[in-house]
Amino acid sequence: MAESIKLILLSFIASIGFGLKFQMQTRYLVWAGLGGALTRLCYLLLLLVIDSRLIYSLLAAMFASLYAEIMAMKFKMPSTVFLYPAIIPLTPGSLIYSTAVNFLLKDTTAMWQNAADCASTLFGISIGFVLISTFTYYRRVYFLGKDLASHLLRHPHKK
């Protein structure tokens, strides 16, 4: 329990740090940190109930993306402003490190296992982002009308 609270707090701090690195305005830094902390909390809860790395990574990424979209609507900012700091807790840094170390130690079995786990995590994260991003885009098209997407259908040479 204490380890989980420590991870959530560190995710909050790390997300604020990445917000600073991306030169986020200071009034949004707490929201960026909250996104990272809530994403870590979601990830830890999903770890308890789901065994598949792909599925819990996908669902946690969907949560982070949904959080970013909600904050973007609330503050009238691009969603990536909140998405990048929120996904920091999901990055499989230890798996990438373990893969590289096992490569250097020529432990191919462990290297391929870590590489497969890393690829599964990254695949789940990317699919989670795409699903929520696509959903929110088409939700806006549906509620705001077809004029929002008309720029996609227009030919560049016609005016």
Image (tube, helix red, strand yellow):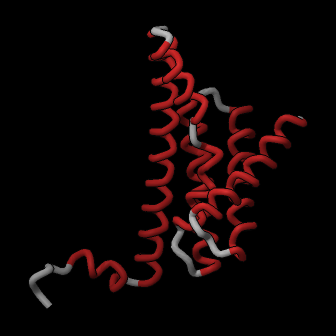
| Residue at image coords 63%, 27% | 51
Describe residue 154's horizontal placement relative to residue 27 as left or right: left
- Image vertical order of residue 53 relative to residue 147, above or below: above
Residue 153 in the image: x percent, y percent? 21, 76
- Image vertical order of residue 68 relative to residue 12, above or below: below
| Residue at image coords 51%, 73% | 78
Describe residue 38's horizontal placement relative to residue 22 as left or right: right
Residue 72 in the image: x percent, y percent? 58, 73
| Residue at image coords 60%, 61% | 21
Numbered disc total: 0
Q: Nearer the viewer, residue 135 or 34?
A: 34
The quarter of the displayed image where residue 46 is located: top right
Q: Residue farthest to the right? A: 2
| Residue at image coords 68%, 42% | 43
Q: Nearer the viewer, residue 50 or 156?
A: 156
Quarter placement of the C terminus: bottom left
Q: Residue farthest to the bottom? A: 159
Residue 126 in the image: x percent, y percent? 46, 47
Quarter placement of the N terminus: top right
Q: Residue farthest to the left? A: 157
Residue 87 in the image: x percent, y percent? 59, 51
Q: Nearer the viewer, residue 145 or 118?
A: 118
